[in-house]
Image (tube, helix red, strand yellow):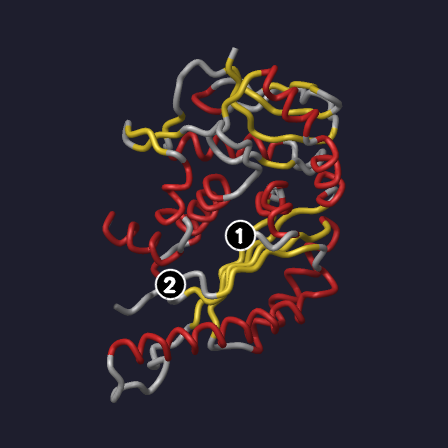
């Protein structure tokens, strides 16, 4: 039997009322190898990316967030009990370490946009190649400065962070912060104070989320060893 | 083109952030993800460019109007 998998968590009791998952299927707790997974029975071959399905995935993961901090799986994960058992057994140490790392925490998101219509750099006399390089250099330098500033503003409240510098032309920072649940109020207050200091920046703040950005143990492994 | 972030309301932002988190992040069990868009099967990585940037999302929203 195929299973659609939403998340992996430390052992939990089944909720009194199961959440509604992909295509309206019931999301049940499946206990395997000492972990609890939220899964739905799944009959198809592919998962359509629809708004309803994406929101259902998010809602199921969120449904146990008050009880525990799960590791969300990426949308579209379909497996079966035997393969899941094998995966959990072979990755037990990394999964347990990551669950311990996120325990009691949630993810907060901060995206920062450079909020000005002024030209980035005076490059009117340059050719297109030189202009591109100058602008890229300026964006990267600006992103580094803002990233360091943001980290310093929030540092005491961050258990972990994932930061992308200048991922797009206008977006100079995309950060995910792992924050203790009890510190969310302080985090918001601190961020509100910090925003007052940088009027040229536009902040998009979201959360609390389950720790989507702190769940990928393969990514953690690669990052640790400097392989991208 | 000037980028007006104010055109994105909170509901749009919540939806975009949910898309970004659910589709672009999370634990990956290699080789077990198959999704489809408009009946076309895709491996997930093909979607990153479409769904991971605020600017691109803004473009999508603007065209939708």
In the figure, B38 relative to A191: above or below? above
Helix, strand or loop at disc 1? loop
**x%, y% of residue A73?**
56, 34
> Residue B29, located in which quarter of the rendered image?
top right
Residue at 73% of width from left, 51% of height from top? A180
Taking depth in this image into account, of B26 and A112 the one nearest to the observer is B26
- Pick out the residue farthest to the top: A1
In the figure, A22 relative to A65: above or below? above
> Residue A161, located in which quarter of the rendered image?
bottom right
Q: Chain of mark 2?
A: B
Q: Chain of mark 1?
A: A
**x%, y% of residue A71?**
63, 37
Left or right for A154, reference A145? right
Residue at 58% of width from left, 54% of height from top? A176
Mark 1 touching mark 2, by CB under 8 A?
no
Left or right for A219, reference A2? right
Instruction: Find disc 2 in the rendering and name its residue.
Output: B5
Mark 1 to mark 2: distance in Å?
31 Å
Q: Residues within 10 Å of mark 2 (few under 14, many from 20)?
A: some
Residue at 31% of width from left, 80% of height from top? A130
Number of the label disc, if any, that sits on residue A228: 1
> Residue A169, located in which quarter of the rendered image?
bottom left
Residue at 71% of width from left, 37% of height from top? A94
**x%, y% of residue A209?**
59, 45
In the figure, A60 relative to A41: above or below? below
Q: Residues within 10 Å of mark 1 (few under 14, many from 20)?
A: few
């Amino acid at each position: 039997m195929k299973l659609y998998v939403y998340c992996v968590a430390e052992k939990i009791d089944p909720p009194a009322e199961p959440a509604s998952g992909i295509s309206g299927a019931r999301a049940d707790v499946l206990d395997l190898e000492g972990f609890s997974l939220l899964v739905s029975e799944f009959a198809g071959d592919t998962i359509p990316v629809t708004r309803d399905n994406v929101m259902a995935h998010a809602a199921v993961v969120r449904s146990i967030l008050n009880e525990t901090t799960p590791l969300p799986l990426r949308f579209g994960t379909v497996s079966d009990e035997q393969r899941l058992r094998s995966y959990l057994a072979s990755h037990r140490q990394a999964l347990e370490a990551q669950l311990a790392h996120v325990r009691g925490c949630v993810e907060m998101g901060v995206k920062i946009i450079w909020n000005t219509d002024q030209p980035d750099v005076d490059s009117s006399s340059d050719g297109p190649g030189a202009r591109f390089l100058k602008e890229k250099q300026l964006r990267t330098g600006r992103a580094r400065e803002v990233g360091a500033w943001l980290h310093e503003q929030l540092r005491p409240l961050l258990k972990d962070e994932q930061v992308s510098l200048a991922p797009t032309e206008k977006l100079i920072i995309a950060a995910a912060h792992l924050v203790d649940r009890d510190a969310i109020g302080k985090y918001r207050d601190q961020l509100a104070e910090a925003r007052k200091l940088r009027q040229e920046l536009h902040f998009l703040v979201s959360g609390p989320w389950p720790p989507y950005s702190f769940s990928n143990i393969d990514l953690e492994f690669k990052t640790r060893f400097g392989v991208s | 083109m000037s980028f007006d972030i104010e055109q994105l309301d909170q509901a749009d932002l919540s939806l975009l952030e949910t898309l970004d988190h659910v589709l672009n992040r999370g634990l990956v069990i290699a080789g077990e993800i198959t999704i489809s868009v408009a009946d076309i099967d895709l491996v997930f990585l093909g979607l990153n460019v479409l769904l991971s940037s605020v600017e691109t999302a803004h473009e999508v929203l603007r065209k939708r109007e």
